[in-house]
Image: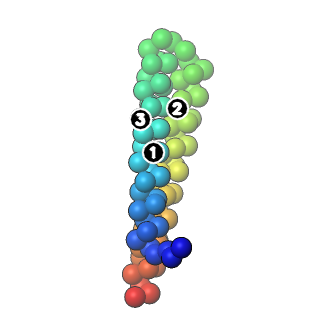
Amino acid sequence: VQTSPERDVLTIANVQKMLHYTIASYGSLRAWSSLVGDEDARILFDKLVDERKRLDRSLTEIAQESLYSGAGSR
């Protein structure tokens, strides 16, 4: 299977789509936990949202590096 920077970026974009769905879901659960007064659950979902956001930023950086390095090799 041949790889290219463009293919790598498309793969990362698809992973990020799923990740964004997860962030939104955890964010909703965090809000619900606050609403019902479950502080332990709110803290857990807050940590999960933060972790997923950091992962999303890392994936964006990887995609950008892949494109920049691929553009220079042409």
Residue 43 in the image, given as x and y percentages of width and height: 57, 26
Q: Nearer the viewer, mark 1 or mark 2?
A: 1
Residue 44 in the image, given as x and y percentages of width and height: 58, 28
Q: Earlier in the sequence, mark 3 or mark 2?
A: 3
Location of mark 1 (residue):
18
Location of mark 2 (residue):
46
Q: Which amino acid type is marked by label 2?
A: Asp
Whether residue 28 is visible to the viewer of this picture, yes or no, is yes
Q: Residue at x 49, y 65 (%)?
A: 62
Whether residue 60 is visible to the viewer of this picture, yes or no, is no
Query: Dot 3: within a 10 Å radius of its alpha carbon, few (fewer than 14), some, or many (20 or more) residues?
Result: few
Q: Choose between 42 and 5: the one closer to the eye.
A: 5
Residue 72 in the image, given as x and y percentages of width and height: 41, 85
Q: Which mark is residue 24?
A: 3
- Height in image: 53 above or below 49? below
Q: Which structural element holds mark 2?
A: helix
Q: Residue at x 47, y 52 (%)?
A: 15
- Height in image: 10 above or below 72? above
How many marks can you see? 3
Q: Residue at x 51, y 49 (%)?
A: 54
Q: Residue at x 43, y 68 (%)?
A: 7
Q: Which amino acid type is marked by label 1?
A: Met
Q: Nearer the viewer, mark 3 or mark 2?
A: 3
